Image (cartoon, grey):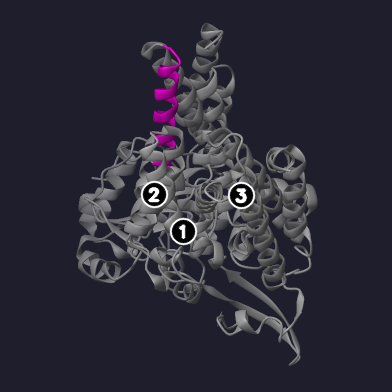
Amino acid sequence: MQNRSATIAGMLLVVCCTIFLTFFYGPLRRIYISPSRIQQASSASEIYQTWEELGVRGRTAILFTRHLNSEVSMKDTEGFKLAELAMSHGIVRTIFHIVPDNAWPVVTENLSGRKNARNTSSGFALIVSEGRINVLPLSHYKPLGEKSLVVVEPGVWNKQELAQIAHLIKSGDLSTDLVLIIRGSLSDMETFRPGLPPPR
Amino acid sequence: MQFRMNTVLTNWKALAVVLILAAFLRFWGAFDITDYTDDEYVQVPSAVSLFKYGTTTELQWVHPPLSSHILYGTITLFGDNPYGWRMGNIVFGTATVILIYLVGMHLYPGTAVPLLAASLLALDPFHIDISRTTFMEIPTSFFFFLYLYFMLKYCEHSGKALFFAGIALGLTIATKAYYIFTVPMVAAYAFYRARQRGESSGSLLIDFSFLLFLLPLTIYFLSFIHWFGRGYTLTEFVQMKNDAVWTVKNLTLSYFHASDNILAAGKPWQWFLKPVIYGYQTFSDGNSGRFLLEINNFPFRMLTIPSLVMASVYAWRKKLMQELLVPFLFVVCYFIFLIVNRPIFSTNATVLLPFAYLIVARTVVLIARQRKREYLIYAGFLSCVLAWGLYTFPLVSGQLVPLSLYQPIISMTHFMQGH
């Protein structure tokens, strides 16, 4: 091989580009909002609209709800596929759908029959063309180190679980720049507001 | 006479004639169908979505995205119309004919093998059909044969060939994973040949590591730039690939929209053993009709397995290492389709065809050499290839044909509903 040193130098440059692409390019392309905020939403379509208007991109979403997609609010927006739409449009890249522990047996039964539901150590991963939707009970949830978009549906959780979720957000274990409360009250807004100490 | 025929069989003018024919059969009428055909209804929207949002649609995400880049490139150049959808495969399909010729020149120099193999591919109704739509098997096999060509050049003398082989290899693995086992076989063969040439193992290992591992890997990752642009990291990339393997392993017939096609096309072990014709009749007035058929070129494909045995035994007995390469690559590549436990589309056979036709061509040459009128056999064989290719072309390209003339083929066809 002629000019071996030039080849090696060129290849090392190529390797550096690859490392940049695979480790840093993705995180650099994510768009966060500042300062962090909390607000209410009444439906899945409103959640999508809020994310879109705020211009967030490439994010992880944590949904503390009972149902996914059109069923997030369990009323309107029939057929609105929040997860798939947000992922296919690059707003969200991965979703963690956290459900109450008492609903887990039903969720397990529903998902076991689905061809795209893959068993994971903490629950299921729904493998869709747009990305990955991880479905797991609250007791198996461990927060990521990454700032996430959070959606909470207070009505489906008991007091203990609500306190646990509030603690995750307020303590900063679950880092977030946007919390959306589905069908919640003003007091729920204060309960889940990031940065304030958890209620006693 | 013999000298003149020898010149004809191995010179560039013969290749030019075959190439013009290949291009004509792939171009002519390819844009007449203005609706999506075959997988275009998945691949075109998926390519557009990749560039718009960074996500592909349907099952496209399980494959590397380079074919979507190519497709989007031609759509950008020619518009979101049949020209933009099909131009890429038409060009790559035609260019593969050149590559099979060049590879044949390296492996079987001074013989009629390159011309016979290139003619078989150029006039193959199956390859013509696949080249006139968006199937990613066409660019994949083109890139692999480009890699093989440069590796064979490198076997003869070092230089820049290995660098170009590395680029071609990167493009191959960034398109589809068909050649995952054949790629290292070719590298091992080139390593062996370079050692024979006197290169030291140490320097070869450095060259191969950089140019046949890191460079292709970089191209592979670069092809995912839109995917990484959605915020992903390497850890998530590994998870996505793991999910892709899981998804592909768990595919069942009911998943596919075109499951009827899979059933009609038969199992992979049948690809080279029996005639398979299926497709659609798009028009009929009782006397004439238009068809879009997939014809597995059975008169010549069925020669593959006997030829494989004959060519391999010959090469083994004569200790011709380079002549064992193509049969070996064919077996390794085909083996994956034979053992995989999931529904497989017959279009996958496209990636095996260049190997198959090199093997068939080699066997024809071996047989012809044992006869007195060697060149008469070549002329006869080429005439049969030409006649069959021209006869079947209207059936794979939607041309109006008299039904009486095509009754033998039509009677063997499994017709699909709903085109």
Q: Which is in the foreground here, disc 3 or disc 2?
A: 3
Tags 3 and 1 both on a single chain: no
Disc 1 secondary structure class: helix
Q: Which is in the foreground here, disc 2 or disc 1?
A: 2
Q: Which residues are magenta?
A: B180-199
Q: Are marks 2 and 1 in contact (CB under 8 Å)?
A: no
Residues packed near mark 1 inside 10 Å, few (<14), some (14 to 19) or many (20 plus)? many
Which residue corresponds to mark 1?
A: A83
Q: CA distance from mark 3 to mark 2?
A: 29 Å
Q: Where is residue B222 shown, x and y percent of the image?
A: 54, 34
Q: In the rendered structure, the residue with mark 3 lies on which chain?
A: B
Query: For this rendering, which residue is in front, A115 or B365?
Result: B365
Name which residue lies at 50% across and 72% down: B275
Label drawn at residue B374: 3
Which residue corresponds to mark 2?
A: B331
Amino acid type, residue under disc 2 in the picture? Val
- Work out whether mark 3 precedes mark 2 in sequence or the reverse, and give the earlier one: 2
Q: In the rendered structure, the residue with mark 1 lies on which chain?
A: A
Q: Where is residue B379 shown, x and y percent of the image?
A: 68, 55
Q: Are marks 3 and 1 in contact (CB under 8 Å)?
A: no
Q: For residue B269, what is the image quadrant?
A: bottom left
Q: Is residue A175 left or right of residue B398?
A: left
Amino acid type, residue under disc 1 in the picture? Ala
Q: In the rendered structure, the residue with mark 2 lies on which chain?
A: B
